[in-house]
Amino acid sequence: MKVNVKTVMLMVALMCVFMWLFGNALSDQYFLTQWLEWMPTLFVFVLLAFISAVLAWMRAWKHIMLPASLCIAVGLWYSMYENKLFVSCSESGALRIAAWTMSHPKDEFATESAEFIVNLNADITLLSHGWTVRGKPQITDWLGTNGKKLVRFPFTVLTKLPPIEIKPLIASDSIHIVSFTLDTTEKIGKPVVLWAVDFPSSFSRSRYDVALVSKRLLQEIEWNPPDIVAGDFNMTTDSAAIRYLFPQLRDASHLGGCGVMASYPRYFPIYLIDHFLVSDEIDVASYKLINPLSGRHRVQLMEIN
């Protein structure tokens, strides 16, 4: 039986796009579809571009229309929705907040990381697993006598703003959530309740199960609703698990994002798994991701009014 190469390439293109669409439509509410959702859009785009180029080389003009059209559609989705490649990052806000998942050797890069944090000069800096870095003299000098190092579980908040309350919410089953309330009245006219989160990254664990467990644990305690939730979610931007856990919050990358909206892996970012979620009362002036030149995650930087 003779194999029609052109037909096979078309089938491969359609199958790839179908799995990508299926994963994005159902998101991570099911264990199987959560891995289809993690299919990189850039991979789909490159595959479609390659198939279109091969068909053009073969002069198969009748076959090239479909993969070429799909390639353009996926490229627009990647550059304009998943990322904000044509959006300027010029706008600034009254309050500058940074969040960095520091999952890399702390001793080896601690000095460089501390200098990066100081140069970033955020009003609030949230570090996950930043144990060694927070003790560096550069950090202490930068904070001065009025600065604070607020430490709970794996989180460290560095700030010169007065803390009002620190309340651990969850430390169970590799799920960590801590509520930090800071007096940001001089900056934005009201205090801010910041929830720091760190969710499991295991490949064998359902992301939706993490959301279910987290919500059940939160229902057993009292807490103030967050204005901002930040940290390493290990969930994608349009995650059903995030929508279930924080239905009233919006992703800052959609509100004020500019540039590449991917935080992991740092050296060639594909996934946005670190997030800033904000309430309707928060006006996001800008949101971007910065390469700190060390570690596995890029740094989130958000400015709000």
Image: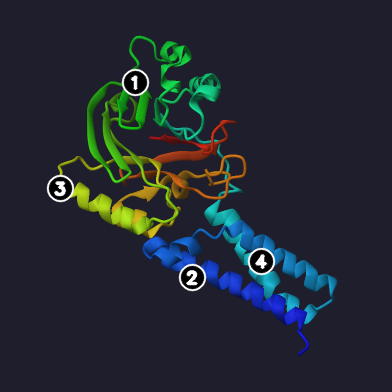
First in sequence, mark 2 or 3: give its number: 2
First in sequence, mark 2 or 4: give its number: 2
- The quadrant the C terminus occupies is top left
Residue 247 visible somewhere in the drawing: no
| SS at circle 3 | loop
For the point 44% across and 66% down, the residue is 32
Circles 3 and 4: CB atoms closer than 8 Å: no
Mark-to-mark CA distance, 3 and 1: 28 Å
Judge whether 288 appears above or below 294 on screen: below
- Residue type highlighted by circle 1: Lys
- Residue type highlighted by circle 2: Phe
Q: Looking at the image, which is closer to me, 93 or 201?
A: 201
Mark-to-mark CA distance, 3 and 4: 48 Å
Residue 132 visible somewhere in the drawing: yes
Residue ID for mark 1: 149
Mark-to-mark CA distance, 1 and 2: 44 Å
Q: Quadrant of residue 291?
A: top right
Residue ID for mark 4: 71
First in sequence, mark 3 or 4: give its number: 4
**Is residue 139 shown left or right of residue 148?**
right
Residue ID for mark 2: 22
Residue ID for mark 3: 220
Mark-to-mark CA distance, 2 and 3: 35 Å
Mark 2 vs mark 4, foreground winner is 2
First in sequence, mark 4 or 1: give its number: 4
